[in-house]
Amino acid sequence: MTSFALKIVAIISMFCDHFGDALIGHFSFFNLIGRIAFPIFAFQISEGYSHTKNLKKYLLRLGIFAVISQIPFSLFSYKYLGASPLSLNVFFTLFIGLLAIHLWNELSNKRDGVFVRNFEQKGHTYSSTFYLSIILRIVVVILLAYLANVLNTDYGFWGVIVIFAFYFFKDKKAVMLTSFVILCIIRYGLDIINYGFNYAYVLLCIFTAIAAIFIGLYNGKQGKKIKYLLYFFYPVHLLLLYFIF
């Protein structure tokens, strides 16, 4: 499955989610299908970081469309979901997630790889510099994820951590997908702890985790090049649904 095919799956899933909100107005099967979308978008961000030729333009593009999409998102979410107009759309989450990945690498100790190889091949131990580098980077990622929560972005803290996890484990697909499923269980498990058991949380967890199947089928190829398909589709379809329903 190419990157383009993944985007199409995510876009269809996202549309079903928002269509269900507009047409039915309460939790439905459309919303379950919609859980597949964000994990794919999160994975695409991690892949985009690895393949982009210009990170600054990538961040700028996400930032611009976050601003462009905010009014359509606020109108839609307030009308159909009763959400606060101050909630921020998913592009802000993707932006923060991409920034977390970037800062993780920027703050890395250039000798990290050497320490790891020496430890494995020659029995050398890690230095305090290595540990301090790791701790600093973990703190930065957590703070950025917390920032997403403070700003009330779509998917918030969990969304940023998912984006980062996809990148962190990118070289080990089985571990990457397993960590994602664990994050799904943690997210909806906390909902059950906080709000009480409800089968809806179980179904939401299952359908969110289903995204791992599509991501697992990804073959590393780009496919058709339609860079701005998602960027424009997101605000446009929200506006159309807002005015039609």
Image (tube, grey):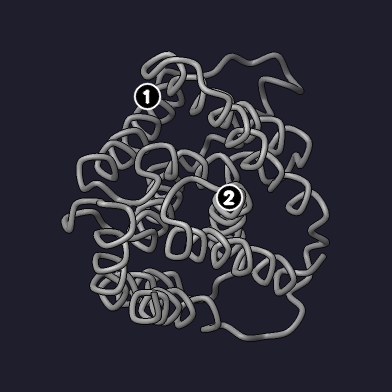
What element does badge 2 sit on?
helix
Q: Amino acid at mark 1?
A: Leu
Residue 70, quarter of picture: bottom left
Residue name at image x 44 percent, y 20 percent: 190
CA neighbours of label 1 inside 10 A, class few (<14), some (14 to 19), many (20+) = few
Task: Answer with left or right where residue 174 lies relative to residue 232.
Answer: right
- Residue 92 screen position, x and y as percent: 32, 59
Task: Answer with left or right where residue 8 lies relative to residue 127.
Answer: right
- Residue 229 screen position, x and y as percent: 55, 82
Q: Circle 1 is placed at which residue position?
A: 132
Image vertical order of residue 195 relative to residue 172, above or below:
above
Which one is nearer the viewer's eye here, 8 or 192?
Answer: 192
Which one is nearer the viewer's eye here, 84 or 42?
Answer: 84
Mark 1 vs 2: CB contact within 8 A? no
Circle number at residue 47: none
**Marks 1/2: CA distance?**
31 Å
Q: Circle 2 is placed at which residue position?
A: 39
Residue name at image x 52 percent, y 41 percent: 162
What element does badge 1 sit on?
helix
- Residue 185 screen position, x and y as percent: 58, 25
Sequence-first tag of 1 and 2: 2
Image vertical order of residue 20 relative to residue 206, above or below:
below
- Residue 195 screen position, x and y as percent: 38, 19
The C terminus lies in quadrant: bottom left
